Amino acid sequence: MNLKSQVESIANDFGGKVDQLPERAERARKMVNEAARDFADRATTMVRQNPGRSILGAFAVGFLIAKVAKHA
């Protein structure tokens, strides 16, 4: 196999991969949206079942962020 045919083969393989990018990006977008929806549903359920813990947790996270920001 000469250099020209090797380059053409690599270019064809690369072109095929590039052609698949929009489809793969769409699948990735759908997966991320589904994961985000699932996380939001679980978080909502947890907050409804444990409102006191949720408020305490939010306060603790806010306190830690304030401490880190103060020292930054």
Image: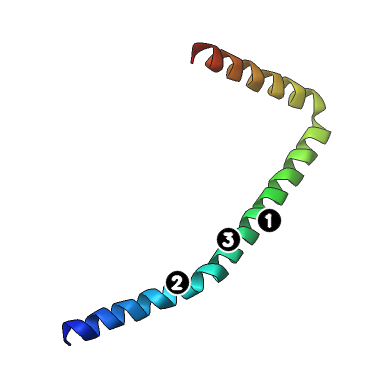
- The residue indicated by pointer 1 is 34
- Give the spatial CA distance, label 3 vs label 1: 10 Å
Tag 2: residue type? Val
Q: Nearer the viewer, residue 38 or 33?
A: 33
Q: Is residue 60 above or below residue 27?
A: above
Q: Quadrant of the N terminus?
A: bottom left
Q: What kind of element bears circle 1?
A: helix
Who's the residue at 61% across and 59% down the image?
A: 29
Q: Is residue 19 left or right of residue 4?
A: right
- Please tell me whether mark 1 or mark 2 is closer to you in this view: 2
Estimate the spatial distance between the alpha carbons at disc 1 and disc 2, rounded to whole Å: 25 Å
Please name the residue that numbered disc 3 is placed on.
28
Query: What kind of residue is marked 1?
Result: Glu
Q: Earlier in the sequence, mark 3 or mark 2?
A: 2
Q: Position of residue 28 (x, y in %)?
A: 58, 60
Residue at 75 percent of width and 27 percent of height: 54
Residue 4 horizontal side relative to residue 33, left or right: left
What residue would you read off at disc 2? 18
Indicate which label's residue lies in the foreground, 3 or 2: 2
Question: Residue 36: image x %, image y %?
Answer: 67, 49
Residue farthest left in this picture: 2
In 3D space, how far apart are the residues under numbered discs 3 and 2 (Cα atoms)? 15 Å
